[in-house]
Image: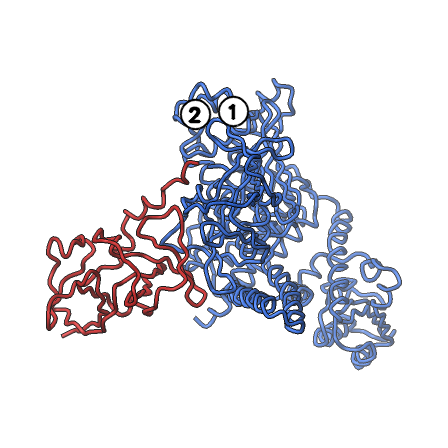
Amino acid sequence: MENSQYLDMFLDESREHLQNMNDNLLALENSPDNVDLVNEIFRSAHTLKGMSATMGFENMADLTHKLENILDAVRNHQLQINADIMDVLLAAVDRLEGMLENVQSGEGDRMDVSDIVAQLQSVLSSPNQGSEAPGPAKKKTETAEGHDAFVQSVIVQSLEQGYNVFRTTVTFDESCVLKGARAYMVFQIAEQMGDIIQAEPDVEKLEAGEVGPSFTITIVTKESQEDMRSKIMDVSEIARVDVVDLKTIAAESAGGGGASSQATDARSADKKPQAQTAARAKATSKTIRVNLDRLNDLMNLFEELVIEKGRLEGVARKLKDTELIETAERIARTSSSLQEIILNLRMEPIEQVFNRFPRMVRSVSKELNKKIRLQIEGAETELDRTVIDEIGDPLVHLLRNSMDHGIELPEVRRQNNKPEEGSIILKAYHSGNHVFIEIEDDGAGINREKVLQKAIKNGLVSESDADKLSDREVYQFLFQSGFSTADKITDISGRGVGLDVVKSKIESLGGVVEVESEPGKGTRFTIRLPLTLSIINAMLIRAGGETYAVPVTNIVETALYKHEDIMTAQGREMIDFRGRVIPFLRFSRLFDLPEEENKGKYIHALVLQSGRKTAALAVDQLIGQQEIVIKSLGTYLGDVPGISGATILGDGKVALIIDCASILYA
Amino acid sequence: MSEKKYIVFTLNGERYGVPVEQVLSIEKPEGVTPVPNTAPFVKGIMNLRGILYPVIDMKQRFGIGESAVQKETRLAIVQIDDIKVAILIDSAEDVISIDEESIEPAPEVTGGVKADYIHGVAKIDDGLLVLLNLDRVLRDKDVEIVKKIEVNER
C-alpha cells in the first residue's frame, strides 16, 4: 500500500490521541462539568477520525465518528455525563485501541463493534432526563470559555513558532448591502494567507449577513501586517481594516491578546478544525521521531568509541608522552559529554508507562468491588527507553497485587477505622545513579506468620530458623516462585505466576525490588533501577590471574586488611567493618579459582553492598576505576551465577562483570 | 543433484563436517577468559571484533576426551540464529562439496558422539565424514542444567 510509509507515523500518533482521550475521559469522570476536557477529547477524536479515514481505515473512522457524536452532544449540553456514558465511551476507546493493534499487526481495522455501536446509539437516542437544556446564555459563555483557553494556547504557540498573529477588524462601507458576501470574501482571502483561529461574530452568522458595521477575525499567518491589510482592502465595500499584531500585545501583557475577546461560538472553531490542528502540529514540530534501531546503532558505535578511548588512555599512560596524555584526556572529556547526550536521547518520561494505570485501577477495583484511588507522582521522571519497554509488566503485576491482596474491602476498612477508599501511591524519582519506583498501599500489610507458614510448608526455611529471620528476609519469600498467600485464587493475581516473575524481570534490568510492610497500615514495594544500562563505572580487579570488573555502584570502599583481622564464626570468615561484623568472602573461593598464596602483610578487599547486604570481598589486586561497556554473555551461556555480563578491555581481552547482588544474597 | 559445502575439521583424528554457512571464520585460540560457574566444556569467552563468543570444547561436550591447546588447534566461529559460539577443534582441513543424496543416516554411535548430534555420514575419497547437527548440539537441553549450577558454597 502506498500509505505504508506513513503507517508508523499513523500508529504513533493515533496511540497518542487514544491515550489523550483515555486520560481526559478519566479526568472527566471526576469533573463531569468540565467543558475543556470534553473539547480536548473531541479534538483528539476528530483528528483520529480524519487520520484513520485518510489511511483508509473506515471502521476506525466510523467508530470514532459515533464517539464524536456523543461528545458533541455532551458539549452542547444535550447529554449529561454519567457513569454509564463513561463506561460506553471508555469501552469505545478500548475498541479503537484494539483496532489499532490489529492494524499494527497487519490485520487491518476490521473488528466487530456492533455491540459498542449499539450502546453508543442508545446513549444518544435517550438523552438522560437529568440535564434540562440549560439557558442559551449559559451555554454560550461556557463554550466560549472553553475555547478561549484553546485559542489562547494556539496564539501563544504560534507566536513561539515565529508566526504572526493578527487580530483584524474589518469595517464595512456604510453603503454595503451584501455584508455576508463581503465577509465571505474576506474569509477567502484570509484563509489563503493563513489560518483563521477565531472570528466574532462566528462564521455562520457572518455568512448569513447577521453582521453589524464591522467584524473581527484572528489569523495565524506568515504574511506581514501590511500585506494582510492591503489584501483585505482589495475587497470592495470595505471602509477600513485595522490589523493589530498580537505579538506586541502578548509582549505587553502575557496572557492578554486574542483571548480577551468574548463570545466565540463553539462551532466557529469546529468549522476550522483542520486549521487548528495544522496550527497545533506546527507548534509541536520541534521534535522528530527517530527509529529506536538508529539510536541503538549510534549507541553501539559509541560503545566502540569508549573501548577505543580506553585503549588510547592506556597507550598514553604507557608512553608517558604529555601531548598524547592531554589528547587522551580531551577525548575522554568529549566522549563523556557525548555519552550524556546519547543516553539522554534514549531517556523518556515514565509517564507513558504510568498513563495506562488509572484505567487499569479503575476497572480492577470495579471487578474487586473495592474503592481504590491511585495517586501518581513523578510521572515526568526519565528512564532509558529499554527500561521503559520492559518495566510495564512488572508494575502491572505489583499494582494488581496491591489491589488484590493489599487493599481491603470497603466494609473491612470501615471496621478497621480506615477510610472506605483505599489509596495506592505510585511514585517515581531519581536518586544518584538510580531511578526508584515505589508502589505504596494503605492496605492490610503483609501477614508475617502466614508467609512464614507457607515458606516452611514449601521447605524454604526450617521451623527452627523461622523465628530468627528478620521481617525483610521473611518478605523476600514472597518473591519465590509458586508463592501466593492468597487464600483463594482470584482472577486478578495469585495464579501462581507471581512476584517471582516480577523479581526476575527487574533483576534482568539490573534492578532490585524490595518490600516493606506494616501490618494494618500498608505495604510498600520499592524498585531500584540503574539509570543507564550499557555503560557503567567499574573497579577492575585481578583474581586467580584474570581481570574482573566490579560495578562501582556496589562498592562502599576499598580496604586493606591484615590476616589477623579475619575472624571465624560458624565456619565462615567474618570481618569487622566499622563496628559491624560482615562476611569476609574470598574471590578465588567464590569462583573456584586457583588461590594465589598471599605473602604480603595485607589483603586487598572491596566492601560491597547490594540492597541491605554488606560483605567484604578479598581480591588479589586492585587495578583501578574505569568506564566499561556492558556486553551480554550471549544466548548460549545465558545467566551465569555471580556474573552479570562481560566487557572488552582496552587490550581486547574480555573481563567478566561481577554480579554483586547474586554473590551477596547467595 | 544438490551439493552442499561442508567445512571439514578433526577431533581425535576423526573427521567431522559442518555446513559452511554456519561457520563465520576459523581463528586461532587467543585471549580466552575463563567463565566460572559454567559447564566444564565451556572453556571461557573471547572477544572477536567486538563480539563475545563462548569457547566450547567439543570433545568434552561429546564426552570423547578433552582438548589440549596445541599449535594446530583452531576455533571454528559458529553462528546459528542468535547463538554465537567458538568451537575448539584439533585442526581445520578444508572445504568440500557433498552430494546430499550420498549422505547416509547416522549409525548408532560414531566415534562416541551421540547419534542425536549427527545429521548423517558421508563417504569421501579416503574415509568417512561425520556431519554434525550443530543446531541440536548447541540447543540441547543438557546445557540448561549447566546454567542452574549454584554459586559455590563458601
Helix, strand or loop at mark 1? loop
For the point 87% across and 76% down, the residue is: A239
Residue on which the image places disc 2:
A461
What is the total number of numbered labels drawn onto the structure image?
A: 2
Question: Amino acid under label 2?
Answer: Val
Q: Secondary structure at mark 2?
A: loop
The colour mode here is: by chain
Which residue: 58% across, 41% down?
Answer: A607
Relative to residue A24, is residue A232 drawn left or right? right
Residue in the foreground of this view, choosing between A542 and A277: A542
Image-based side of B142 in relation to A213, left or right: left
**Residue visible at 36% across and 42% down?**
B148
Q: Evaluate if marks 2 and 1 touch, with contact meaning CB atoms under 8 Å apart.
A: yes
Which of the chains bears the disc numbered 2? A
Colour of chain B in the rendered structure image: red
Res A369 seen here: no
Give the percent coordinates (x, y) of residue A85: 57, 42
Considering depth in this image, is A498 or A77 the residue closer to the camera? A498
The amino acid at mark 1 is Leu
* Mark identifier at residue B33: none
x and y percentages locating residue A423 in the rendered image: 62, 32
**Dot 2: within a 10 Å radius of its alpha carbon, few (fewer than 14), some, or many (20 or more) residues?**
some
Q: Relative to the observer, which residue lies in front, B86 or A488?
A: B86
Compared with residue A377, is residue A474 higher up or lower down, i.e. above or below? above
Q: Is residue A384 left or right of residue A252?
A: left
Counting residues from the N terminus, which is met first, the one under dot 2 or under dot 1?
A: 2
Please name the residue that numbered disc 1 is placed on: A469
Neighbourhood count class around disc 1 (C-alpha, 10 Å): few under 14, some 14–19, many 20 upward: few
Using the numbered discs, state the Cα–Cα distance from disc 2 to disc 1 in whole angstroms.
Answer: 9 Å
Q: Quadrant of residue A15?
A: bottom right
Q: Colour of chain A?
A: blue
Image quadrant occupied by the N terminus of chain A: bottom left
